[in-house]
Each structure stands twice: as C-alpha cells, then as structure tokens.
Amino acid sequence: MNPLRAGVRRPGRLAAEACALLIAVVVAFPLYWMVLSAFKPAGEIESSEPRPWTLEPSLDSFRRVFGQQEFGRYFLNSLVVAGCVVIASGLIAVLAATAVTRFRFRLRTTLLIMFLVAQMVPVEALTIPLFFLMRDAGQLNTLGSLILPHIAFSLPFAIWMLRGFVKAVPEALEEAAYIDGASRARFLWQILFPLGLPGLVATSVFSFISAWNDFLFAKSFIISDTSQSTLPMALLVFYKPDDPDWGGVMAASTVMTIPVLVFFVLVQRRLVSGLGGAVKD
C-alpha cells in the first residue's frame, strides 16, 4: 500500500473511531448511572449535587429488592413469558417464512403486505381492543394474556426477516435432499433450520427484549392477581409518588437488565451474522 495514501486515510479513520467511541459512551452512560445509583447509599442518591462516582458503595438497595416477598415470583413469571414468546414465535415464524417463500398460493402477496401493515400499527392503539379480547376469552390475570399478544406482535418482523434466509437457501439443495430420501420435515429441521439459525437468533433477541421489558400489557391485563405479575411491575413497589425509593428502582432495574445481557452474550456471534444478512449460495 502506498504510505502517502495510508497517511491520508488515517485521519479519517481516527475521526470515525473517535465518533464511534463517543456514541458508545453516550449510549452506555444511562446504564452506568443506573448501576451506580443502585450501589449508592440513600444520602448520595437524594443529594442535590449528584456525582458520577461513589466512595461508599452499599448493597442496601439490593437487599430491599430481594427482600420483597413477590420479587422471585415476578422474575420467574418474566422468564416464563419471555421464554414462551421466543420459542413459539420462532417456531411459527420459521414455518410461515418457509410457506410464503417456497409455496405459490393465492393472496400470498396480500399476506406479506398485511405483515408489513401489522408492524406499522402502534401497540398503544391496540391495547384497549386486546383488553376486551382477553376479557372475553377469560385470559385476564393470567400469563397467557401477556404471551399471546407478544407472539402476535413478534411474528410480522420475524417472518419478514426469516423469509430472506429461507429464500437464500438454494432450491437445488432442497431437491437434492428429496432425491436422497429426506422428507419435508427432515429437510426443514436438519438443513433449513441450521442455515437460517442466525436469522432466528436475531429475531429471538428482539422478541425476548420486547416480552421481558413489557410494562403496558402487564399493567393493563394483570389487574387483581399480583401473583401473575412480571418483573417490570416490581418497579412500582419501589416507586411511590410521595416518597420514591430511587435506590430500589435502580437496583431492581439492574437485576432486570442482567438476563438481557446474559442472553446477548450467549447469542452475540450468531446475532451479528444474523443481522449481517442471509446465507449465500
């Protein structure tokens, strides 16, 4: 490489790296402040001169969080809801993406357009209709009232994303599998599923985050039976309009964030490849 050209490119590269670092700091600062506030003693949190550090870290906020009798149940309910949404939406999305990609049938284009339209509808506009639907179905105050809507809202994005991965799998590969005696179910499970796994992981991340952080549906559909509440509802225990426990709120938020970070760490490699594009022939 020409040293002169390399020297010309270097300032631009340094500027890009500095910009990326600045963006990373801005994005990470709220997370840092949340964790810091969780470890601050009450006096520092309520101080009129907040500092971005603490010399006397305390676990009192975490003790109050784990001392809540229902906190463990809320945590388990959130895991059940998020796990069911990820598994069910992933399975249905793979089958639906295969159907709209590999098969020719009437109204196929209309169906794909409906998936796009469904993504444009704001969740808030459908909360009241969904409330009456869950009430008539007898699902209020149950985890099913949280699982079913999240599956429905996760499917359009998942189907559209997985459609690209399914389409990128060569039809010649499918024909070769059938010639070798593989059934359609075997081809789907042993060939198509592994090739589309990066895309499935990417859609699962979005489904997991949406279900795990949900507050709107949990507040609207879980009315009287607090044993069916999820983790975001635990924040209300520490937030009181007259005397909010900000240390408890931040500690509970930190505990809430840990499973999401663990999930990201476990799937990060496949997530990058999934967001990068479909497999190539």
Image: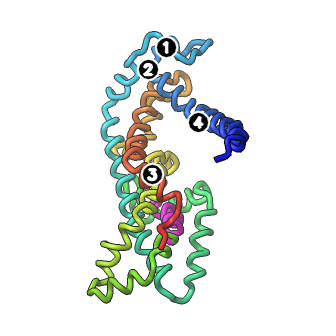
The amino acid type, in three-letter code, at marker 2 is: Phe
For mark 2, give the secondary structure: helix
Measured as percent of width and height from the top left, residue 8 is found at 73, 40
N-term mark: 2 or 1: 2
Measured as percent of width and height from the top left, residue 113 is found at 61, 75
Residue found at x 51% / y 88%: 104
What residue did someone put label 2 on? Answer: 39
Residue 185 drawn above or below residue 67: below
Q: Nearer the viewer, mark 1 or mark 4?
A: 4
What residue did someone put label 3 on? Answer: 211
N-term mark: 3 or 1: 1
Q: How many C-alpha atoms fall within 10 Å of the one at disc 2: few (<14), some, or many (≥20)?
A: many
What residue did someone put label 4 on? Answer: 24
For mark 1, give the secondary structure: loop
N-term mark: 4 or 2: 4
Task: Find residue 242 and report its image quarter.
Answer: top right
For mark 4, give the secondary structure: helix
Q: CA distance from mark 1 to mark 4?
A: 22 Å
Q: How many C-alpha atoms fall within 10 Å of the one at disc 3: few (<14), some, or many (≥20)?
A: many
Cβ–Cβ below 8 Å for labels 3 and 1? no
Cβ–Cβ below 8 Å for labels 2 and 1? yes
Q: Nearer the viewer, mark 3 or mark 4?
A: 4
N-term mark: 1 or 4: 4
The residue range painted magenta reads 149-163
What residue did someone put label 1 on? Answer: 54
* Residue 63 is at least partly visible in this image: yes
Residue found at x 58% / y 60%: 126
The amino acid type, in three-letter code, at marker 4 is: Ala
Q: Is residue 189 left or right of residue 121?
A: left
Judge whether residue 160 is colored magenta. Answer: yes
Residue 143 drawn above or below residue 252: below
